[in-house]
Image (cartoon, helix red, strand yellow):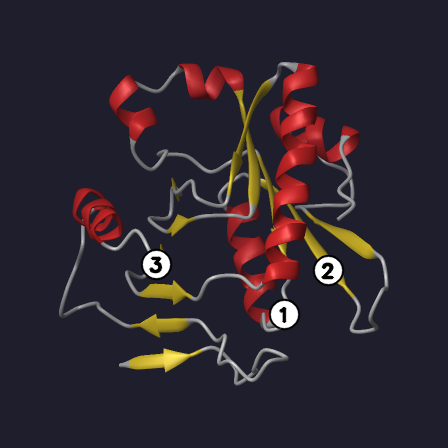
Amino acid sequence: MTTFSPEVNAPDGRDDRALFMHLDPVVRLNDDQFYELCRLNRNLRIERAAGGGMSIMPPAGGETSRRNAEIARQLGNWARRTRTGSSFDSSCGFVLPNGAVRSPDASWVLRERLDALTDEQRSRFLPLCPDFVVELRSPTDDLAALHDKMREYVDNWGEARLADRSSRPGSPSSTVPVSRSSVCTSPRASQPNRCWRASA
C-alpha cells in the first residue's frame, strides 16, 4: 500500500508531500540492499522506517534549503571548534538500532564512536544513532510525523531538537529540545544540547 503524508501543498501549488511505501512482508531489504537502492536513486531522498517501509521525500524548497545549510554550518563550526566529534548534513544516512535508516537535516556524532567504526562502515550509512540531531520543519511538514521521528531518535539514544518557525512571515526560528527528561542525563549527548543553539 502506498500512502502520502497529510495533504499539504507548497505555496507555489506543488505537491510536496512525502510518499510512503509499505513493503513488508512482500519485500524485505537488508542494510546492503537498501544502501544499493539509494545509490541507484541518488536524486531521491529515501529513508527506511523501522518496520521496513520507505519514505521518499521531494527536494526542499529554496528557503528551507537555505535554513538547512545555515543550521548545518553552525553545527559544523561548533564541532570544529570543540573537536569533540563530527557533524553531518542531510545527505548522511544513519542505521538506527531499531533498523530505521534516517537522514536528519543536521547531526553530530561523538569522536570516540566514529573512531570505533571500520573504514568500510564509515564509507556507507553509519551504523549508529547520532548523538545529537536537528530536524528543520518546512512549511509542508506534518508536525505529528516530525514529533514521531524526533521521538525515534531519542528512543535510540540520541538527543534531538526540532527547529520550527511560526506561520507568520518573518517570525524568528525556535528550537525545541526533545529528550527523555528536561535535564539531559547522557554525557555524550549533552555537549551540543547545552552549548549549541541554532538560529536560521
Type of residue at label 2?
A: Asp
Mark nearer the N terminus (2 vs 3): 3
* Towards the viewer: 169 or 161: 169
| Residue denoted by label 1 | 143
Whole-angstrom CA distance, mark 1 to mark 3, is 22 Å
> Relative to 193, is 160 above or below?
below
Which one is nearer the viewer's eye here, 49 or 137?
A: 137
Under tag 3, what secondary structure? Answer: loop
Residue 187 in sight here? no
Q: Amino acid at mark 1?
A: Leu
Reply above or below: 119 against 168.
above
State the residue position of label 3: 44
35 vs 48, left or right, is left
Residue 170 appears in view:
yes
Q: Is residue 111 left or right of residue 48?
A: right
Place residue 187 in its image quadrant: top right
| Residue at point 50%, 75% (across, down) | 16
* Earlier sequence position, callout 1 versus callout 2: 1
Packing grade of label 2 (10 A; few <14, some 14-19, many >=20) is: some
Image quarter hosting the N terminus: bottom left
**Residue nearest the observer in this picture, 69 or 131:** 69
Residue type (three-letter) at the residue carrying disc 3: Leu
Q: Position of residue 75 (x, y in %)?
A: 66, 33
Q: Residue at x 30, y 72 (%)?
A: 21
Q: Are marks 1 and 2 in contact (CB under 8 Å)?
A: yes
Mark before the other along the chain sequence, 1 or 3:
3
Give residue 87's position: percent from left, percent from top. Answer: 56, 30
Q: Residue at x 39, y 16 (%)?
A: 116
- Which mark is drawn over residue 164? 2
- Separation of disc 2 and disc 3 at Cα? 24 Å
User: Which type of secondary structure does the marked residue at label 1 adopt?
Assistant: helix
Depth-wise, is mark 1 or mark 2 nearer the camera?
2
